[in-house]
Image (tube, rainbow, N blue to C red):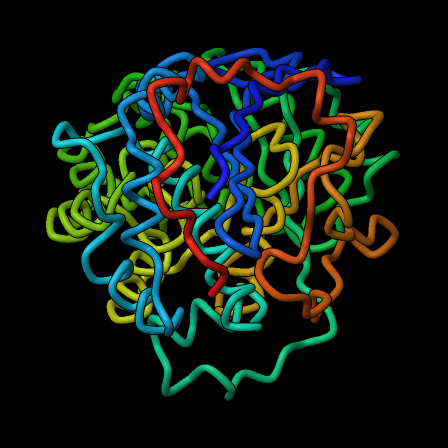
Amino acid sequence: MTLPEIYLVRQPMTTPFTHGAHRRQTSESVVLRWTRGAFTGIGECAPRRYVTAEDCESVLAELRSIDFARLAQALASVDPIDRGRALYEQGLPFFPDKAVGNNTRCLVEMAVLDTLAQQAELPLSSYLLHITAPATATRRVLPAQANITQVLDLSQSVQVFFQQRKPLRSLKLKLEADLHANRQRLESLRALAPTLELYVDPNMSWSADQLHNSARQLRDLDVALFEEPLPRGSLEDYRQARRKLGIAIMLDESVISPSSLALAWKLQALDAVNLRIAKCGGLLATTKMIEQCHHWGLPVYLGVQVAEVGPLIAAHRALLTAYDGFLAVEAGQHDRFFDSDLMEPMPAIDRQHNAIPLPVPARPGLGCQLTPHILPFQQATEAVKHLKEPLNSERAQ
């Protein structure tokens, strides 16, 4: 085993992205590269304090508490499928007694799953199905593409966006607190695209009264879903809005685990859910939540964090390949935000047809590796400096 390489990626974005909770001009990711025996895995998390109360510094601090040498020994197995099933059922072994945040868990778990899938000689999408739903691992027939739901943030006008992006089927529109300004943007949008499936996202910036007033005054503009308009955790307000006013709610920041999803479902607080891998605590928790939703018949919107830089994008494509029936799918905008790629190959986006080509190339694991462009972001080994190589190096499995 070699010690993990850790990268704090704050990469300037060529264009900003603005919504009701934040204006982003740089990426904010922690990337991990970890070699165990003959296999090297990569992972990424994108912590956002307004989403899970985590940031890159908190992730780096939590990484110091993880005994990677002991974790590597625990993961050694002659059967990577069995090891993956154990991780799915029990979680990562030898994590610190104090629970780590969702983004730290996502980061380490992704790198581990990448190496295990490589060892099993399976693409990560197939590996996930083998460890979570083996009966369906080889049954899915993929379409030629997955249509993209684009996101129009507050930094762009509706007219310029439509001229440049030409959304075809669905759109998520970021909204602000000003109802008059919101209505103007929606009216401009509907003048250009009367039948486009429309989701609006105020990013937790409204009060309950603002939600009720907005739903009434925007009703004629045919909004399909309001995504997390109220402060995180406002489940009772959402239940009342759905029951009394018939407002269709898609939760995002309030749902960050299988248990929080189950609570929201029990309280009848949602009509759909936006699942994002880092927010949910990694691929395995996200697959559990997808399966919960499939069992209940609850629509799943497969979202992304703004300004993902590499491994998270590949992991998103693995979920898209493994599961179907998503309400809508985002693709991210790495091709627009960044001048250089930190990972190769980068997942393809067909901008002409607003689609993700399928199937994703079937390479073992995530099927990607970090490029030399990542090196300026490498952190000194102090994040894991307390670790030592195990006395007996892990042999390649």
Residue 345 vs 218, above or below: the answer is: below
Q: Report whether residue 179 is seen.
A: no
Is 338 on the left-hand or right-hand side of 58?
A: right
Q: How many marks?
A: 0
Q: Relative to the observer, which residue lies in front, 248 or 222? A: 248
Q: Relative to the observer, which residue lies in front, 26 or 100? A: 100
Determine the residue positioned at 60% across, 47% down: 330
User: In the image, residue 291 lies at what x, y percent?
Assistant: 31, 66
User: In the image, residue 355 lies at what x, y percent?
Assistant: 74, 57
Q: Relative to the observer, which residue lies in front, 259 or 71? A: 71
Residue 273 vs 279, above or below: the answer is: below
User: In the image, residue 127 lies at what x, y percent?
Assistant: 47, 70
Is 282 on the left-hand or right-hand side of 374?
A: left
Residue 40 vs 288, above or below: the answer is: above
Determine the residue positioned at 41% across, 45% down: 274
Determine the residue positioned at 45% across, 13% down: 177
Determine the residue positioned at 54% across, 18% down: 19
User: In the image, residue 334 lies at what x, y percent?
Assistant: 72, 34
Q: Relative to the observer, which residue lies in front, 330 or 224? A: 330
Which residue ends up furthest to the front in the rendered image?
391
Q: Report whether residue 175 is seen.
A: yes
Is 173 on the left-hand or right-hand side of 297?
A: right
Is 385 on the left-hand or right-hand side of 191?
A: left
Q: Image quarter for residue 311? A: top right
